[in-house]
């Protein structure tokens, strides 16, 4: 599972306007940190990845930038490595070469000579000549390589084919270009309930405590749109007194919301703050993510949430009352977050999606009897197999719910991550 973090500036840590000064900084940078970047790229080749290094490293932003540039162009970089290698390149060597190529082709702030020398330094002794040769060759032919490069080279074919179910031609080109552009720093202003650009906030919000003090939740626009739609459903139920939950106590006017997959808790906090009369039952299976959720709740001073460290599949009516709304932000491929997490293009494949689909469906079936009015199903993905197909499958066997509406949040139209959500209403 890829952690959703909200720390996404990509500026150079030593933001000198001079290319030469940058070059010196880069050349002198700690080889160990570069080695860590290479090992993170290797993790991606091996199918997993953790962001921890970038959050803790002193020069995190710069190394993060190398990593992100490598990931944004990985299929293209891989094809270049293949055409330049006579024999199979091991994933470990490939990860070193890939970060060198990314700097040469896609990072103007790093001079070619610095990219070559700092990368060769990382290679095992007997492989240094090959790494030096391939990088020098890429640097020498850079212009013709870049002249042939298109946005389609940067994504796996199956990823592009699935996006063709949404759009083709010039629109597909725009979508892919958006997906390879650094994300916008969106947030939700809890004072106004409006989605805002955090980087344009008048209070110059820099730290987590700034954000908390001013009631701003850092979250992608797509995620915030989903949370606001759940809040709207809550307001609709609350405004209709005859609909208000009365299963436990005839005088209980509390709106109960089941947040079935809650951590890290952006949507939980949004719902709790914007629906102060509601009680949100926030379920999270993963203990460390559950702790993140709890600290998020403390940070935003939220009191109307009941966090439960449990598998949603084990949650029964003994754990939660019949809930007016269930938000099921299901575990998914996260392919809709490829803009913020460019590595997902290399990690997630159709096989993962086929594994996730039955889990998503089982979760829907499990939360249905716990839900009185609406299930709001969402995933940060644009893949039909974990969006419309799951809902169709659910409705085929569950006749107690009907599809009220569904739709995608498209990154090129909203300048956001890609999301899908469906509102299912109990008949
Ligand atoms: C897409 S994330 C949820 C994001 C969250 N709603 C937010 O807006 O911050 C999915 C979460 O579901 C959790 N999860 C996965 N399987 C679960 C299960 N069986 N029961 C409860 N939580 C689960 C994952 O650990 C992960 O934290």
Image (tube, rainbow, N blue to C red):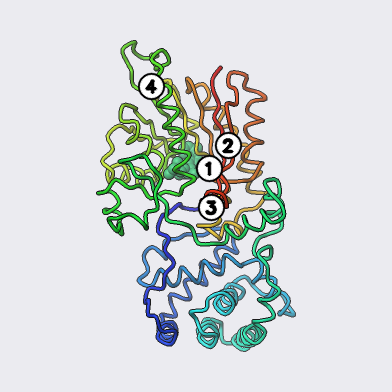
* Mark number displayed over residue 331: 1
Classed neighbour count for the residue bearing mark 4: other residues with Cα under 10 Å, few (<14), some (14–19), many (≥20): many
Look at 43% across and 20% down and name the residue there: 322
Q: Tell me, yes or no, if residue 249 can be seen here.
A: yes
Which residue corresponds to mark 4?
238
Look at 32% across and 45% down and name the residue there: 296
Classed neighbour count for the residue bearing mark 3: other residues with Cα under 10 Å, few (<14), some (14–19), many (≥20): many
Q: Is residue 217 above or below residue 372?
A: below
Q: Is mark 1 within 8 Å of ligand 1?
A: yes
The mark that comes first in sequence, 4 or 3, is 4
Residue 247: name its quadrant: top left
Q: Position of residue 330 (x, y in %)?
A: 52, 39
Q: Tell me, yes or no, if residue 286 can be seen here.
A: no
Does 262 sit left or right of 116 as displayed? Answer: left
Residue 180: name its quadrant: bottom right
Please tell me whether mark 4 sits on a helix, a strand or a loop: helix
Residue 235: name its quadrant: top left
Q: Look at the numbered discs 2 and 3 and tell me whether their residues touch, using CB distance below 8 Å.
A: no
Does 215 sit left or right of 74 as displayed? Answer: left
Q: Look at the numbered discs 2 and 1 and tell me whether their residues touch, using CB distance below 8 Å.
A: yes
Please tell me whether mark 3 sits on a helix, a strand or a loop: helix
Which residue corresponds to mark 3?
337
């Amino acid at each position: 599972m890829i952690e959703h973090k909200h720390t996404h500036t990509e500026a150079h840590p030593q933001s000198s306007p001079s290319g030469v000064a940058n070059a010196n900084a880069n050349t002198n940078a700690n080889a160990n940190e570069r080695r860590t970047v290479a090992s993170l790229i290797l993790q991606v080749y091996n199918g997993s990845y953790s962001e921890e290094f970038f959050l803790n490293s002193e020069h995190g932003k710069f190394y993060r930038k190398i990593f992100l540039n490598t990931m944004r162009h990985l299929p293209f970089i891989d094809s270049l490595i293949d055409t330049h290698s006579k024999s199979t390149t091991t994933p470990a060597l490939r990860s070193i070469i890939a970060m060198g190529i990314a700097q040469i082709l896609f990072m103007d702030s790093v001079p070619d000579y610095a990219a070559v020398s700092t990368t060769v330094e990382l290679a095992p002794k007997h492989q240094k000549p090959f790494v030096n040769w391939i990088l020098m060759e890429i640097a020498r032919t850079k212009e013709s390589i870049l002249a042939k490069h298109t946005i389609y080279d940067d994504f796996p074919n199956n990823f592009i084919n699935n996006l063709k179910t949404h759009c083709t031609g010039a629109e597909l080109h725009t979508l892919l270009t958006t997906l390879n552009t650094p994300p916008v720093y969106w947030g939700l202003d809890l004072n106004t309930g409006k989605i805002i650009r955090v980087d344009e906030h008048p209070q110059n919000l820099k730290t987590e405590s700034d954000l908390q003090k001013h009631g701003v939740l850092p979250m992608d626009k797509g995620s915030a749109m989903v949370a606001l739609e759940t809040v709207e459903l809550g307001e609709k139920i609350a405004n209709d007194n005859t609909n208000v939950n009365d299963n436990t106590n005839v005088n209980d006017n509390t709106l109960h919301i089941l947040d079935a997959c809650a951590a890290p808790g952006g949507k939980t906090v949004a719902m709790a703050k914007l629906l102060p009369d509601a009680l949100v039952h926030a379920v999270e299976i993963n203990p460390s993510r559950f702790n993140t959720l709890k600290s998020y709740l403390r940070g935003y001073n939220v009191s109307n949430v009941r966090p439960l460290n449990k598998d949603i599949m084990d949650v029964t009516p003994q754990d939660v009352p019949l809930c007016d709304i269930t938000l099921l932000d299901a575990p998914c491929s996260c392919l809709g977050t490829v803009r913020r997490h460019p590595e997902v293009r290399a990690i997630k494949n159709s096989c993962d999606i086929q594994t996730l689909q039955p889990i998503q469906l089982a979760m829907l079936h499990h939360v249905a009897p716990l839900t009185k009015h609406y299930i709001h199903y969402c995933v940060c993905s644009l893949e039909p197999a974990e969006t419309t197909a799951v809902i169709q499958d659910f409705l085929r066997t569950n006749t107690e719910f009907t599809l009220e509406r569904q739709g995608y949040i498209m990154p090129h139209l909203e300048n956001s991550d890609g999301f899908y959500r469906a509102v299912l209403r109990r008949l």
